[in-house]
Image (cartoon, grey):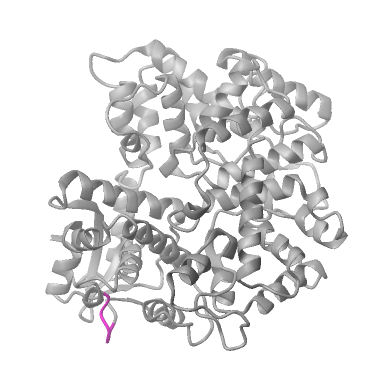
Amino acid sequence: MKYTPASIVENNLLFTIPIYQRLFEWDEENILTLMNDLLQAFEKSKGSEDYYIGMLTSKLENGCNELIDGQQRFTVLMLIACALKEYKNWEDFLGNNPLRLRFTSRPKDDDFLRSLIDDKCSSEGYVNIKMKEGLSVIRRFITSLKNCDKDILFAEYVFNHLCLFISHLPERYGPLDLNKYFERMNTSGKNLELHEILKVKLLKNLTEDVSKYMLLWNKLSDVDTLLIRKRNEEKESQLRERKDRAIKSSIKEIIESSLINGIGQNDESKIIAISEIPLSINPPKTEQNKTKDSHCALSFPYLLLQTLFLKIEGKIEGNISDFFKPNNLLETFQQYLPYEGNNVKVEDIREFMELLVNCRLALDICFIRPSEYGYTLDMNRNEDDESLIKLLMLQSMLFVSSSNYTHYRWFGWLMESIKNHHGIPSTEHLFEDLKTRDDLLHKPIPTLSQLSYGDIRYWFWRLDFYIWLHRNTIFSDSPEALKVADNYIFRRNRSIEHIAPQTPESDSVLKWNDTPEDIRLRDSFGNLVMISQGLNSTLSNASYQVKTAHVRSYINGAKSGSIESLKLLVVHQDYKDIWDKTTIVEHGDKMYQWLIESYQ
């Protein structure tokens, strides 16, 4: 049956997430994709047509709909409701006693969800990071709509037209019945990734080489495992030569020369006896350790779409956002690289596969790989090479300031640079290529007054990159601050915070008057900084003195890791004792001048 938030309220439906289901896992990219799709549907239909986000499967349990499938979608709907609660009807959707959504046998998550709704800290101090960060992403999105007066109608549209279907399982279903249900879902192909379906549909056309291409596709789709890894007794020079050859080679040459691990004449995936496995004093890698490893900057569906975009030279029909939607993967490929019907061109599919291999190798070798602790970059260079570190920092700035919403523009720039250099470019050339393209994209620079509203996070990342690039000069009088700047890591999940708070605590020296001049100065670029969600909530209304004490803890070694804002580090260095209206203007002018200089 079809439901909207409005009909859920009308029918007084309540939902629970059982203990065996995963908690909320959506990241910023997933959430922004949904919010942008909703906005696009709202604008296209002028608020009149439904937007379908999927199906939920539930079982009635003690008067509540226990979510057997679809808990991620319903949780994000609750977060949307939290962000829209000031708008008409949305508080009714959230519910009160009880809430619309509860977590079975997870009282801390129940309490945390209520704390998000009430804008209070959880009573036990527990934080569900994914839910907290997800709500912050949605709130920023709604704020951007406020700036163009679309928020009220958008909130009304989502309440009445965000559409999902709920499939109700019989009440008599017990644990054994649920097990059979999950088995049927898994064996029916319902949970197959779209790229797995595309693999079969696309590659079946390569009749003579289908098994070879299937094996290759499987290797390419495992984006978090490097295609080229050091082999037993292989020297570093040989490994570098193999990478350099592979990125210039055709699939035929790659297979014949065994350039990729596990594919070729000397296939390393052959079966060996247990007795042949060499002994090691190192313990096996645990799941916990695996999560600390680096991973690819793009998911495989996005890599497929980016490769297709290159293949057709960007010549698309309609909206570019529709082209880059992973949910449209099959339809997009059928339109631009047909795999069924009379328009199938086998040679085009072969060319696509050649390009896909090249793109995947480029991501492995020539672009950063994010990890829990920062980023790694190969480029066939030693990791302590100065030009490599400089390129790594530029790429990490481009990475965090991009998303599926901006279609990861850096990817096309990267591939064009590799094409122009006929292989792996030098770190110096790639740096200049990427920097020049990013500069052109972000010209002209906004005025200083414009850097106080809307989504301006890019400019804080750009400024931090400039500060890092010139850190030896900027922090020449403070070796401790220079060391902190050396360890800076760009992170995606950042939000704008006031240095002198909007509603200062009683110990704050600087107080604001309710005048247009003070409001403008309070929200100006000079008084803004970009930090993480967690630090934002910790320091939100704290005085300048408390915030500078936080920076000092990095400088004196009390805190380890990466400081979250180099702009904040500069503020601390320049204004150790006082932060007032005069210094805000002075700092803002100085930072704006640095942004101008960042183009030189």
Q: Nearer the viewer, residue 52 or 268?
A: 52
| Residue found 67% across the figure and 22% down from its top | 259
Q: Quadrant of the C terminus?
A: top right
Dominant secondary structure of the residues highlighted in magenta in the image: loop
Q: Is residue 84 above or below residue 313?
A: below
135 sits to left or right of 518: left
The x and y percentages for residue 360 are: 56, 30
> Residue 214, percent across and down?
46, 26
The N terminus lies in quadrant: bottom left
Q: Is residue 10 magenta?
A: no
Q: Residue at x 33, y 42 (%)?
A: 327
Pick whichever, 271 or 208, lies toward us. 208
> What range of the chain is rendered magenta?
94-98
User: Would residue 564 be visible to someone looking at this image?
Assistant: no
Please state if 171 lies on the left or on the right of 106 as rendered: left
Q: Give the mark count.
A: 0
- Residue 97 highlighted magenta (yes or no): yes
Question: Residue 316: horizontal and vertical position, in percent?
Answer: 33, 25
Q: Nearer the viewer, residue 10 or 17?
A: 10
**Residue ID at (26%, 56%):** 150
